[in-house]
Amino acid sequence: MVRITKDLIRRRAEHNEGMLATLEEVSLHQQGIERIEMLGHVCRALKILYLQSNALEYLNVAINNITRVENLQRCEALAKLDLTVNFVGLAGLLSVASLAANPALRELHLTGNPCTDWPGYRAFVVASLPQLARLDGEEVLPSERILAARALPGLRARLDAELRAAGVDPRDAERVADDSLDADDAEIPETGVEGADGKMRRPWCAATRLLEHREAERRARDDAAAAAAAAAARPGASPPRPPPRTEFPPLEDGVPMMQKNEGKWEFELREGEGALVLDVAIGRHLATELVSADVQPRCPRDKYWRDLIARKFGDRHNYNAGWAAAGA
């Protein structure tokens, strides 16, 4: 399963020089992502997310495995939400009412979800979300809104009765969408049945889509590993480049510290006013959030995205007084 990480977002944010704090638009489609997470913490200025809280205005999560609508209440600027072809069923229809907390929401798309087959679906949504101007591409007229508001008590009673008949408590409907898909990396059981001709036939449901996605992901990993092995076996092939560092390598006791300059950076080490100054010319266009420092008693280390620079001192120094600054 692909998780949304800072590294993934940064790779997709080249148009913003890799800066996440000021990122307003990012495209994460076709990345194999199964869960939306982290964006609210690292991309607080995000306005447009392509995934086919924040200042989010348009969220398109069409053709995913969504079974209920939740955790969008704090997206106060959300104006358009596209949930086309997901798995919001009759129980999940109750969760749609949580969008009433989004005052800017004007357009909602639920076409292709099982809940749209319920006869009172449109009137229930229109009455539950009085701020909507368009539902499934059709304008919500004032007269329709008035009629839907009058019919809402009866629709809710009928919906509750149908859910109870199906063995679902309406009060718990928002919390029991599909427990089999809750675990991030849990093994998904086979959903299909082998026919008389020996072919596997799977029903169209959220578990089937997730199962096929996991299978495609495994095939892609196996193909990539085979291609890498074949490339490494070619005569004169260069060794693969290591992945970007996410943290400093540990310093082991009893192991000599080695000096490094993996990025071939120009640097100067000088003494001045009772301090040792390590000046590294990293270039003005490298985002400061990609730079980190680790000051040890005998070895200050700096990390610039994937490259590490370490300079060993002969004597111990007061590392508690160390500090870092960016120059022009």
Image (cartoon, grey):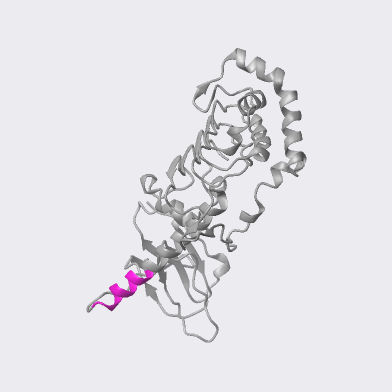
- Residue occupying image coordinates x 45% and y 51%: 9
Q: Tell me: residue 203, above or below residue 282.
A: above
> Of all residues shown, which one is farthest toward the left?
236
| Nearer to me, 295 or 236 | 236
Tell me which residue sits at (22%, 79%) in the image: 235
Q: Residue 197 location in percent, x, y?
A: 46, 61
Q: Is residue 230 above or below residue 179?
A: below
Prevailing secondary structure of the magenta residues: helix
Identify the residue at the far bottom of this view.
Answer: 254
Q: Residue at x 72, y 32 (%)?
A: 159
Instruction: Looking at the picture, tell me which residue is in the foreground, 293 or 319.
Output: 293
Which contiguous range is marked in magenta? 225-234
Q: Tell me: residue 219, above or below residue 74.
A: below
Q: Position of residue 166 (x, y in %)?
A: 73, 42
Q: State the residue in front, 204 or 29.
A: 204
Residue in front for this viewpoint, 308 or 2: 2
Residue 244 visible at all: no
Asked whether residue 178 is drawn in magenta, I would say no
Q: Residue furthest top?
A: 143
Image-based side of 98 in relation to 210, left or right: right
Q: Is residue 202 visible?
A: yes
Q: Position of residue 35 (x, y in %)?
A: 55, 51
